[in-house]
Image (spheres, helix red, strand yellow):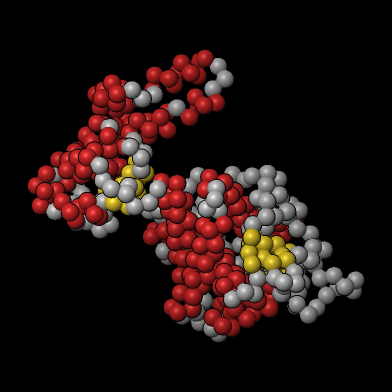
Amino acid sequence: MMELPTSSALFAISASGLVRRAYSPTLSYAKNGVVKALYRPLLVARSAQITGWKSNDTFKIVRDQLGALVQRSCTLMIGMSAQDENIKDLFATMNAQKGWKWSNSPTPIVFSAQDLGDDQKNLLIVAYGEADYEAHRAEICEAARLQAYAKPLLVALLLHVLTSKLEVLVDDAPAANLDASGRTAIVRGLRFLRDRVAVAGNSDRLLLARAIASGLARARHQLQNGTSAFGIQSYFPIDGDPAHLMKGKLGLKSSGQREAAVALGLIGLDEQTGSWTSSIDDAADARSGALRVTSPTASARIFLAANDGVVTNLLECGAFNEDDDDAVVICSGRIAGRQQRSPSGGRRDGSFGPRYLAFGPMLADAASLDDLRDRFREEVSI
């Protein structure tokens, strides 16, 4: 479900845990003895099984894949992983092949721990070599500690990754008059929203992670495909690549995500100044948007759409209707074949219907960040 921070990040719970994760999820849901009989031999749990794991041909492919992952990826280790002999053997192999150096940046091996125990220090010795470890013991141990508990750390990483990807999208957004300081300000808006989410969900982090996944899924299906079915939608990542590989990616040019990321940043900036507050509706509700913004006088569902065809799809699938006063549709492209409503306009019956924002052209034409913010706030009009 979670998007990994970069291609150089490995969440090593333990080799046995990874084997269980790779081979045995079906066991939890098995309804007959045939499935249990098939997967039970692949569980690695007892000490003898952990010791024999490195020579058991059943796990050769897993061993090879883990070895390659350790060679090319930095490692964040959470839990009791370092006590397992098979894990230590993997990192000893890394040292034998002259892989990571303790002085590399970012730090190749990091433990989620207040203080390092003997097992963790022993793993650092076999990974970096005894000579280097003894010569730089204090620096190595200090760099290898990330003093955070597992649950808040993992949620923080998730929020950091998602925000980092949005920041890349903002940096690549087509806006000729939006200078570096303007883009930096928009990034501040994104980070404000990130921090609000973290604080609001801190009391139940599992629920928060699920809410992030379900909310992102609905927003992405709406943005990209114009679909908004009932129930929790299948997960839809921002992008399959890590953040640093998204920079300048041609496939994202027409996705509408760059413009959408800027719009989210603007929402965050105006929330900082008290213009409105943002929230998330029930992600299982087919009529919920990407988020909701509420001012002292009104509230609106915010829908993100990559282009006008997607807007039509959202109308046809019932995400919102033409008489919904509380819908704001932010289109990353132009709005064609549909009346763009001025906040001062209305229908004969006094209703307004949805507000359609051709945000791509607005972004391209804005003279400055202040101009963009004023025009955006006026069009959202709540």
User: Residue sitting at 71 percent across and 74 percent down?
Assistant: 381
User: Residue sitting at 54 percent across and 50 percent down?
Assistant: 203
Please determine whether, in this image, residue 274 is positioned above or below residue 283: below
User: Residue sitting at 52 percent across and 26 percent down?
Assistant: 28
Location of residue 330 (image quadrant) = bottom right
Location of residue 257 (image quadrant) = bottom right
Decide if residue 340 is in sight here: no
User: Residue sitting at 28 percent across and 32 percent down?
Assistant: 84
Location of residue 92 (image quadrant) = top left
Please determine whether, in this image, residue 21 is positioned above or below residue 158: above
Decide if residue 43 is in sight here: yes
Residue 57, position in %: x, y? Answer: 28, 22
Residue 241, position in %: x, y? Answer: 43, 53
Residue 230, position in %: x, y? Answer: 71, 45
Question: Count the marks: how many?
Answer: 0
Residue in the foreground of this view, choosing between 228 and 85: 85
From the viewer's perspective, tell me whether residue 11 is left or right of residue 205. left
From the viewer's perspective, tell me whether residue 70 is left or right of residue 43. left
Please determine whether, in this image, residue 30 is positioned above or below residue 346: above
Please determine whether, in this image, residue 282 is positioned above or below residue 172: above
Q: Quadrant of the C terminus?
A: bottom right
Residue 225, position in %: x, y? Answer: 63, 54
